[in-house]
Amino acid sequence: MKVFVAGASGALGRPLVKRLVAAGHEVTGMTRREERAAEIREAGGEAVVCDVFDAGELRDAVVAAAPEVVVHAVTALPPSFKPRSDYLAATNRVRTVGTRNLVSAAQAAGARRLVAESVAFFYEPEGDWVKDEEARLFADPPGRFAAGRDALVELEQRVTGSDGLEGVVLRFGWFYGPGTYYAADGSMAEETRKRRNPVIGAGTGRFSFVHIEDAAAAIVAALDHGSPGIYNVVDDEPVPQREWLSVYAEALGAKPPRRVPHWLARLAAGADLASTAISMRGASNAKAKRELGWQPAHPSWREGFRDSLSS
């Protein structure tokens, strides 16, 4: 199968290209930087240097590749997870303008299916602690998360509602593993070692994690499995912040995390991040397992953290 991967040189794109090639697919990987094109070629794919915001150039690239499936794995997150007021601005633009351009290019190329990356941690913080895909998204998220929520809604609606395309949205949990914020050399590891990643309040917010390799495997499965629609791609064990953070620190060989009151975290980090630690909902992966035929090789972050941080 011919597959066009937008965002092929990112943390998710790199393992994805390798898995697609290993599965016998013909891959064209898109990157914004010429110096990253060599990595795509070394992995066995064809590389194209293109900007998702250049609609004409993008359309030409996708049409030339003539893919059956287009994968949207483009983000523009900064290298370190240190949220500022504009932390999500670039990625929000990717999820709105970039998605619009990529959908148009996929349609022009006659692609059958479009698989797009979304996130599984924007569910309304009400009721059950673990949500399926039918649960409503955060209606009024605090602070900088409001624009992020709006961009995700636009991405998901555009992907699943575009004429002539089977739109599949994969809502991923928090990535860990090589190339992510939670890798041994990632910014979350650095903050945790310095004890600047505390348990906030009661630490009751549920986190759903997914190893980056399991995320890539889900995209491969979604090429030709599952009906168009939305799927949570997370591991089997949603977990309160107070629990996973202690295990993560131990796996890093770091001291146990500090604890700070919720009111202090609101002042220091903002209402959005503080609320995540106490009220965020986790996600269920039952639909992805059932309809995509996907199973995480790392069913729990517990073993996943230890394995990924010791390798």
Image (cartoon, helix red, strand yellow):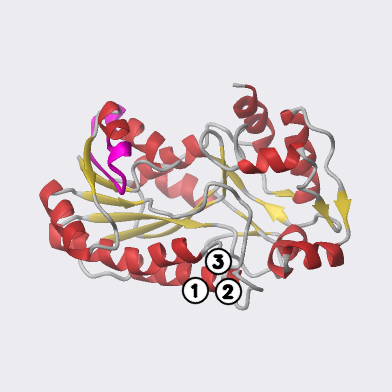
In terms of sequence position, does the residue under pointer 3 or pointer 2 come before the other? 3
Please provide percent x and percent y for residue 164.
20, 65
Asked whether the residues under the numbered discs 3 and 1 touch, taking CB atoms below 8 Å apart as contact, a structural biologist would say: no
242 relative position to 141: left or right:
right
Span shown in magenta: 21-37
Does 48 sit above or below residue 302? below
Asked if residue 32 can be seen in this view, the reply is yes
Q: Amino acid at mark 3?
A: Asp
148 relative position to 56: left or right:
right
Q: Residues within 10 Å of mark 2 (few under 14, many from 20)?
A: some
Q: Is residue 168 magenta?
A: no
* Residue, disc 2: 146
Which residue is the extreme one toward the left?
A: 64
How far apart in space, not on screen, are marks 3 and 2 (Cα)?
12 Å
How far apart in space, not on screen, are marks 3 and 1 (Cα)?
15 Å
* Element under disc 3: loop
* Residue, disc 1: 150
Quadrant assignment, res 194: top right
* Element under disc 2: helix
How far apart in space, not on screen, are marks 1 and 2 (Cα)?
6 Å
Please provide percent x and percent y for residue 304.
62, 32
Q: At x 87% / y 55%, what residue is drawn?
A: 260
Q: At x 14% / y 47%, what residue is drawn?
A: 65
Residue 86 image label:
3
